[in-house]
Every structure is written in structure tokens, then in C-alpha cells.
Amino acid sequence: MSGADQSATPRISIVVAMYNEEAAIDAFFADVDRAAARLPFAVEYVCVNDGSRDGTLAKLLARQSADKRIRIVDLARNFGKEAAMTAGLAHAQGDAVIVIDADLQDPPELIEQFVAKWREGFEVVYGIRASRASDSFAKRVTASAFYKLFNRITSVPIPPDAGDFRLLDRKVVDALLAFPERNRFMKGLFAWVGFKQTGVPFTRRPRVQGKTSWNYWKLVNFAIDGVTGFSTVPLRVWSVLGALVSLIGFAYAIFLIVRTIAFGVDVPGYASIMVTVLFLGGVQLLCLGMLGEYLGRLYMEAKGRPIYIVSRIYEDKTP
């Protein structure tokens, strides 16, 4: 049974991770407050300040003084969105938790539909980006390619064009918080836990204020984290490729030996040797790089450092 069935007076937690979002805070709360006012449940806000360098924290504190529903989790430094999202889930107290970005590209008016689906019995309700016209052509293409690749090589597919914007039942949140891993790819974890899930399509909007902190280098690293966190297929690919290259090399060696013995043709030299050496050297380096990606993640997990460190929690403790 969902949280809506378990409690006579459910509470909805809205979790938002913020990094240098000073310019977007007023517009964010204006839109989300309108959406929250249409809900028949109590609402709390869990705002995670992920080591912002601008006035994000000060603006959140000013807003909290007038709205006691806001709980601020101030992290000791910038730990990244996945860690900040985990911190928000850990400090949310609601029967259902809604994860949303501060840039308003994910429309808050969808929250009412999320809650309606939750009350129907769904335990995970996620937004599906039916249109990404606000994204650049390159980002749309690379995002589509990533979803296709990820779903092809993993046993737990993620819904194409589904981001972090979603509602999670309390039992789902508790399951996610039980995961000990440090390198967290939340889109994959949301799918891995299972439960009864459904999607709600929406049109992705332009960013309301400021500029994104993501760049293509970060997105590439994010994609690598996702693939290596949920699949060992890349390791198998290089094993197969290594075997194939070795077979080709062995066959070519036999060909050269037979040709020399049968026809007395000398083995031609420098160009073919250099091409072969460079090709095999490149393959070896790629194999070592892939092994290094997995080994590095094992190293980080083995150290057992916390996913994030909280500097301070600001909340209204009035009974």
C-alpha cells in the first residue's frame, strides 16, 4: 500500500538540491507554492545547499524566516547533485517525496498529477520529457544515444527521457537510503529498486534564471558513472575485442610465414609494423583505461567515506 493509504494525514516533502541558484529562488518558490496550494496534504520543503558560492544560503534563510515549512540542509562543500539529492531524501520526512530542480525546467504544476497517481497506488511517478526543444541539438542527440546505450547493456533499463523529477513513496525512499554505494547514479537507482512505477509526459521548459553548472565534460563523466555503475559489458567488450585482435594477428602471422616459405617473399617492413604497433598500443591503452574506471570506483567504495557531510541544518523546531 502507498503512503496515501497508510496515513490519515499524509505529508508531501519537496526536495530540491541547489548550487548557485540565488537568481532562481524567488521564481522557484512562487511556482512551487502555487502547485503545493492545490494539494490536499501538508507540504514541507527540503532545500539542500550544495556548497553554493553565491547568496543561495542567505536567500533561503530569508525565505525560511517567513515560511517555517522550509528545512535547509547546508552541506560542508559542493558534493555534486547525486550526493545532494541523497542528502535531501535522507532529511525528508514526508509520506511521499517529490524531487525537483530549482531551474523550473521541470514544471511544478505537474506535482498535482504526480500526487494523483500516487493516490491511485503508484509508488514511483516520474516525469517523461516529451519535448526537449529547450535543449541544444547536441544535447538532445547525446542524451538519446546515452539512454539507448544504457538500456541495451544493462539488465535494469531506465525510461528514456526520464530525469530526476519524480515522486517517491516513503518505502521507495527508505530502500534508496539503504544503498551503501558512494558513486550514485540516481536515475539507475530509481529504476533498480523497482516498485510500481508510471510516467507522466511533459514539455521541458527553458531555464528560468541563471545558467547551468553542467558542461559536456561533466555530462561525459556522469554517463561513464552510470554505465560502470550498472553494467560490466564494457569489460566484456574489451575481452572479446582482445581475443579478436589476437586471432587476426595469429592468422596474419601464419599468412606471412606461408608466403615467405612458399614464394620467398620477404616480409615488408616499417609502415605495416608501425600501423600494427600503434593499433595494438591504442587497444591496450583503451583496455587499461576501462579497467582503471572500474578499479577506481572499487577504490572509492573501499575507503567508505560518507556520501556527503552536513555543515548545519536550519529548521523550525517549534512543536
Image (spheres, grey):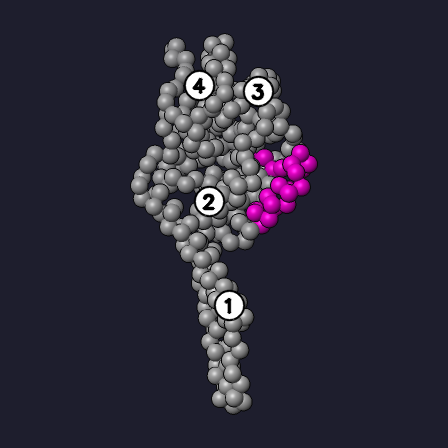
Mark before the other along the chain sequence, 2 or 3: 3
Dot label at residue 225: 2
Badge 3 is on which residue?
Answer: 23
- State the residue position of label 4: 71
- N-terminal label among 2 and 4: 4
At 44% from the left edge and 18% from the top edge, which residue is drawn?
71
Q: Are marks 1 and 4 in contact (CB under 8 Å)?
A: no
Disc 3/disc 1 C-alpha distance (Å): 56 Å
Q: Nearer the viewer, mark 3 or mark 1?
A: 1
Residue 126, above or below 294 = above
The boundaries of the magenta stretch are: 126-148
* Left or right of residue 128, residue 65 in this image: left
Identify the mark nearer the N-term, 1 or 4.
Answer: 4
Mark nearest the camera among 1 and 4 is: 1
Expressed as whole percent of the image width and height from the top left, the position of residue 136 reads 66, 38
Residue 277, position in %: x, y? 48, 66
Marks 2 and 3 close (CB-CB < 8 Å) = no
Asked if the residue at tag 3 contacts the one at tag 4, i.e. Cβ–Cβ closer than 8 Å, the answer is no
